Image: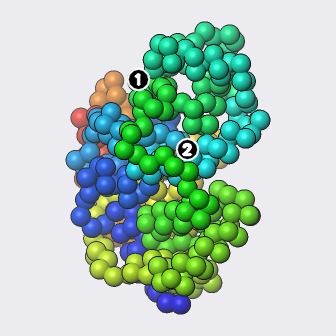
Amino acid sequence: MENISIQEAQRLALASQKLIGPALELQKIIEHLGYIQIDTISVIERAHHHVLWARNQKYKPSDLDHLVKNRKVFEYWSHAASYLPMKEYRYTLPMKHAFQKKQSSWFPRDPKLMAAILKRIKSEGPLRSKDFENTKKGQSGWWDWKPSKKALERLFLEGKLEITQRRGFQKVYDLPENVIPNSVDTSMPTEEEYLRFLIQRTLRHHGLATISEIGYLGKKEIKSKLEKIAREMLYEGTLQEIRVENSSKPYLSFSNALENLPKVNSKIHILSPFDNLVIQRQKLNDLFDFDYQIECYVPASKRKFGYFCLPIFKGRHPIARVDCKADRQNQKLIIHSISYEKNDDRDDIKKEIASKLKSFAKFNGCKGIQGI
């Protein structure tokens, strides 16, 4: 087992997240990270665009539409709704087949309605949920979705429909054969292939991870299976065990993970609450001593940092949180508050953050900033 410093662990994590080192083109970013979470909140530019912009400042939202249109990425579930690399399509099949066996879930099976929907799409081509008659009134949330919308989502989760595009933010559903290119491998992976994929994908974009972190969405059974596969990969020499100073957790990493790491620069990064770096909150705390929570789900009276506070990093240090909103009508980025972490050099940090917020405002389609 190799012992590494907390600084080395942070450097490995940031390099694996492509937040340091040379910027990659869009498709390579998504293929490296493995998924980009899609989110409905639009206080600022949506999370899937924000995550990509954080890694390449030349990114434009239309770039992602181009990848979808050219079938380089597709939508499915990772730990949440996400854009995934088309080349890894087959690794969504185990989840799709698991959904086919479930009688109940968020979206219960309605075989008769599902068959009718498939028949319409086969006949008419791609459709949105609004193209189906609304049979309920007074919807207030996803739990009140009309039956056809639930059936569409069920068909999507089972892999019987794919999302071919979005119009505005509305999903457009089509048959898999019209969305997934013939060149893509659609064979069901074996259990071992799937488990190895989970390990490799996690380590590819996190750099180091525990078995619990790799299988954090799975049940106890999958974690024991992951442990077995990890032992095999350690024996093969693909993986190594590392221990971070002042931590008792045994981490896994690729055997060559610490070679040729880029230097940590002092760039400012304004990150999404759903960024791949920060999405596992306990790990963020363990490695960066950063106790972060998104507060839009917290009652207003209990918020400490604001409705949609964004983590701000400088190099490997979390330095602040900014709560802001894009006023698109007036083309202003409104800064509600900036809360600083412990740091002695606050005046310089303020200037650097203000400079970064100018480019962030431009990314959000705003010409000016209000509040700083």
**Residue 331 in the image: x percent, y percent?**
29, 30
**Residue 121 in the image: x percent, y percent?**
51, 18
Q: Is residue 56 left or right of residue 104?
A: left
> Could you tell me which residue is drawn at 58 percent across and 21 percent down?
118
Q: Nearer the viewer, residue 289 or 159?
A: 159
203 in relation to 188, above or below: below
The reply to whether callout 2 and callout 1 are in contact (CB within 8 Å) is no
The residue that label 1 is drawn on is 167
The crowding category of the residue bearing disc 1, from other C-alpha atoms within 10 Å (few below 14, some 14 to 19, many at least 20), is few
The residue that label 2 is drawn on is 77
**Residue 68 in the image: x percent, y percent?**
36, 36
| Residues at marks 2 and 1, CA–CA distance in whole angstroms | 19 Å
> Could you tell me which residue is drawn at 61 percent across and 43 percent down?
96
Q: Nearer the viewer, residue 189 or 29?
A: 189
Task: Point out the tag, 2 or 1, that comes first from the N-terminus.
Answer: 2
Secondary structure category for the residue under label 2: strand
Q: Nearer the viewer, residue 9 or 160?
A: 160
**Residue 160 in the image: x percent, y percent?**
57, 32
Q: Nearer the viewer, mark 2 or mark 1?
A: 2
Secondary structure category for the residue under label 1: strand
> Could you tell me which residue is drawn at 59 percent across and 59 percent down?
190
Q: Which mark is residue 62?
A: none
> Could you tell me which residue is drawn at 70 percent across and 35 percent down?
106
Location of residue 270 by image quarter: bottom left
The crowding category of the residue bearing disc 2, from other C-alpha atoms within 10 Å (few below 14, some 14 to 19, many at least 20), is some
Query: How many tags in the picture?
Result: 2
Q: Is residue 171 left or right of residue 299?
A: left
Which amino acid type is shown beneath numbered disc 2?
Trp
